[in-house]
């Protein structure tokens, strides 16, 4: 059983950030990531990396943070009374990719660790994370590939892990006020400590390491698809759903803002351009309608 709860995960998260940034920069081929290292007055800090105005990616942000404090925000303590009176650490990598071509999906991934401690008591810890895919114009083979890689990352940890964490993803990335999912899902888990620490950490590494193999082949397949103003305007409209979810429901965004995290890093997930249109309706039978009719419906993509 591991006794040092933070050193190995911190090293892994930093290395994962390096690997993902290198992979995305190579896929873009024209732009590189700018690094912004920051400190938080209450304790800890982070390393934000952002690529903008690339050939493939209009914006890509990959953020590492490791923040700590003597006590949790009141809202968090109210939800978890057993954490009252404990100091805490929260660390992880979070990324969001907004491609330029509307045929390449937006994607998000996150892996993180939370630890709460007090003298003469066992630490309270859990991991969270996952990855999800948000297409604008869907392709069955892309969804199948995405979920096949996700299932393979889960397989060593139990036959039911993929099914449970896929369903968790579908439930979490759902916009109740729109009555629709954000995308085609993937994996999501939070407050995960059902295994021992080392096994849970190994699972988180498996999920983190699976992101590039899941996403980059889709980028390569779609990067040369031709598109015009119609596709661009639909992409910008659908990006609005992404903004709505992140600002209204996302737990990581809310925790970061409530714990006085660095706003620039927290909100780097937002797209550079987005639009809303009053009472927008897609044309029945159109390629845009197919997103709603096919890809935003509950699906078993492994059996598709």
Image: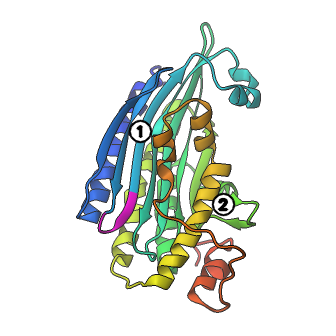
Q: Position of residue 110 (x, y in %)?
A: 50, 47
Task: Say which element carries label 1.
Answer: strand
Cα distance between the residues tagged 1 and 2: 25 Å
Between 174 and 235, which is closer to the camera in this rendering?
A: 235
Range of magenta residues = 54-59
The image's mark for residue 146 is: none
Where residue 207 appears, as percent x and y from the top left, is 47, 50
Rendered location of residue 250, percent (x, y): 63, 48
Measured as percent of width and height from the top left, residue 214 is found at 42, 63
How many numbered discs?
2
Tell me which corner region of the image, top left, top right, bottom left or bottom right, holds residue 126: top right
Q: Residue at x 41, y 39 (%)?
A: 64
Confirm whether residue 249 shows in the render.
Answer: no
Q: Residue at x 64, y 92 (%)?
A: 285
State the mark number for residue 170: 2
Using residue 178 as the reference point, say whether residue 221 is left or right of it: left
Q: How is the image coloured?
A: rainbow
Confirm whether the magenta stretch covers residue 89. no
Q: Residues within 10 Å of mark 1 (few under 14, many from 20)?
A: many
Q: Residue at x 40, y 33 (%)?
A: 46
Q: In the rendered structure, does residue 58 fall within the stretch colored magenta?
A: yes
* Residue 217 in the figure: left or right of residue 103: left
Rendered view: 299 above or below 286: above
Residue lying at the far front of the rendered structure:
278
Q: Quick one: label 1 or label 2, which is nearer the N terminus?
A: 1
Q: Nearer the viewer, residue 133 or 8?
A: 133
User: What residue would you read off at disc 1?
Assistant: 64
């Amino acid at each position: 059983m591991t006794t040092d709860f933070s050193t190995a995960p911190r090293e892994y998260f930093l290395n994962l950030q390096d690997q993902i940034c290198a992979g995305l920069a190579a896929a873009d081929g024209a732009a590189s990531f700018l690094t912004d290292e920051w400190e938080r007055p209450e304790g800890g800090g982070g390393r934000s990396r952002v690529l903008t105005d690339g050939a493939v990616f209009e914006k890509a942000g990959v953020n590492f943070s490791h923040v700590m404090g003597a006590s949790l925000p009141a809202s968090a303590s109210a939800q978890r009374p057993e954490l009252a009176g404990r100091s805490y650490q929260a660390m992880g990598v979070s990324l969001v990719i907004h491609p330029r071509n509307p045929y390449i999906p937006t994607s998000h991934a996150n892996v993180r660790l939370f630890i709460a401690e007090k003298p003469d008591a066992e630490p309270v810890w859990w991991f969270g994370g996952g990855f999800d895919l948000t297409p604008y114009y869907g392709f069955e083979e892309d969804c199948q590939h995405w979920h096949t890689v996700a299932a393979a990352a889960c397989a060593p940890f139990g036959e039911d892990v993929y099914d449970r964490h896929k369903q968790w993803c579908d439930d979490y990335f759902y916009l109740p006020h729109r009555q629709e999912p954000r995308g085609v899902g993937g994996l999501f888990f939070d407050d995960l400590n059902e295994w021992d620490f080392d096994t849970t950490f190994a699972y988180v590494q498996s999920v983190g390491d699976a992101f590039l193999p899941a996403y980059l082949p889709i980028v390569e397949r779609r990067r040369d698809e031709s598109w015009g103003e119609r596709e661009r305007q639909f992409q910008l409209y659908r990006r609005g759903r992404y903004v709505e979810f992140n600002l209204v429901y996302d737990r990581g965004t809310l925790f970061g803002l409530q714990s006085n995290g660095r706003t620039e890093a927290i909100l780097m997930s937002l797209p550079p351009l987005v639009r809303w249109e009053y009472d927008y309706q897609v044309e029945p039978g159109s390629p845009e309608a197919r997103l709603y009719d096919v890809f935003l419906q509950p699906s078993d993509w492994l059996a598709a």
